[in-house]
Image (cartoon, rainbow, N blue to C red):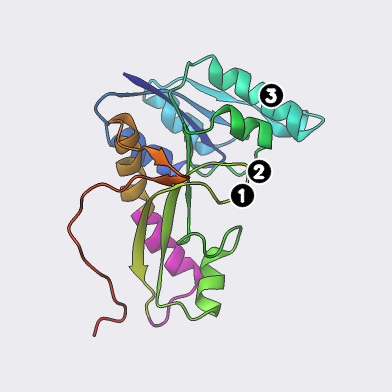
Amino acid sequence: MKNIVILISGRGSNMQAIVDANIAGARIAAVISNRPDAAGLAWAAERGIATAALDHKTFASREDFDAALAQLIDSHQPDLVVLAGFMRILSAGFTRRYEGRMLNVHPSLLPAFTGLNTHQRALEMGCKVAGCTVHFVTAELDHGPIVAQGVVEVLDGDDADTLAERVLQLEHRLYPAAVRRFVAGELNIVSGKIASRASVAGSLMAPAP
């Protein structure tokens, strides 16, 4: 049984998707937030999951917060740490501590559009597709070995909000699937990349010809 600790900052919709997936061989050991008022904490507690809040504003430095957070995470003996809308940039020391066992989902097709405002930037660039990426976390923001990507077509009339909503729905399917692969031992990092597994060849073109 793999212990999973999930970090959130708000409602934790991706956390909810992972919990609801009931992944075989996985146990959600705890949900932790840097915001005591995060709605996702109540949702998790109602389902019998251990929860905790660690307010980053009470710490003198990022490193002090990260050290306290790591101590709290480690008390649950995690095999995997999942960032699910955790709105904190983590220190290099923290990311090294969980190297190869910490996942994040980013709302773009990395390496394009790292950072914030991903959907607006995609629209401004005239992208025909957008999407999301699940990746292992490294010290470099929004980098690290890519586990999985999902794609949606950019529609005429889309704005940042409508595009964000469709991408989020995609995240809710992609992220649990990626966690399931980790639990099953399928995510092997070779030369900084996830070793490919056999798949049916295919392509995506948008707009379709």
Q: Main secondary structure of the magenta part?
A: helix
Residue at x 34%, y 42% (from the top left corner): 178
Marks 1, 3: nearer the viewer:
1
Q: How many marks?
A: 3
The kind of residue tagged 3 is Ala
The kind of residue tagged 1 is Leu
Which quarter of the figure is the C terminus placed in? Answer: bottom left
Residue at x 57%, y 40% (from the top left corner): 9
Q: Is residue 163 above or below residue 54?
A: below
Lower position in the chain sequence, tag 1 or tag 3: 3
Residue 167 x/y as whole percent = 40, 60
Mark 3 nearby-residue class (10 Å; few <14, some 14–19, many ≥20): some
Is there CB contact under 8 Å for labels 2 and 3? no
Q: Which residue is mark 1?
A: 141
> Where on the picture, by quarter, is residue 152?
bottom left
Q: Which residue is mark 2?
A: 89
Q: Would you say residue 4 sits in the magenta stretch?
A: no
Is residue 36 among what the camera can see? Answer: no
Residue 142 x/y as whole percent = 56, 51
Local SS, label 3: helix
The kind of residue tagged 2 is Ile
Q: Is residue 39 above or below residue 168?
A: above
Mark 1 nearby-residue class (10 Å; few <14, some 14–19, many ≥20): few
Query: Where residue 67 is drawn, which disc sits there?
Result: 3
Residue at x 49%, y 16% (from the top left corner): 76
Q: Is residue 159 above or below residue 70?
A: below
Residue 122 x/y as whole percent = 51, 72
Front residue of 58/183: it is: 183
Instruction: Give the Cα distance between marks 2 and 3.
Output: 14 Å
Is there CB contact under 8 Å for labels 2 and 1? yes
> Residues in magenta?
156-170
Relative to 51, is 208 on the left or the right? left
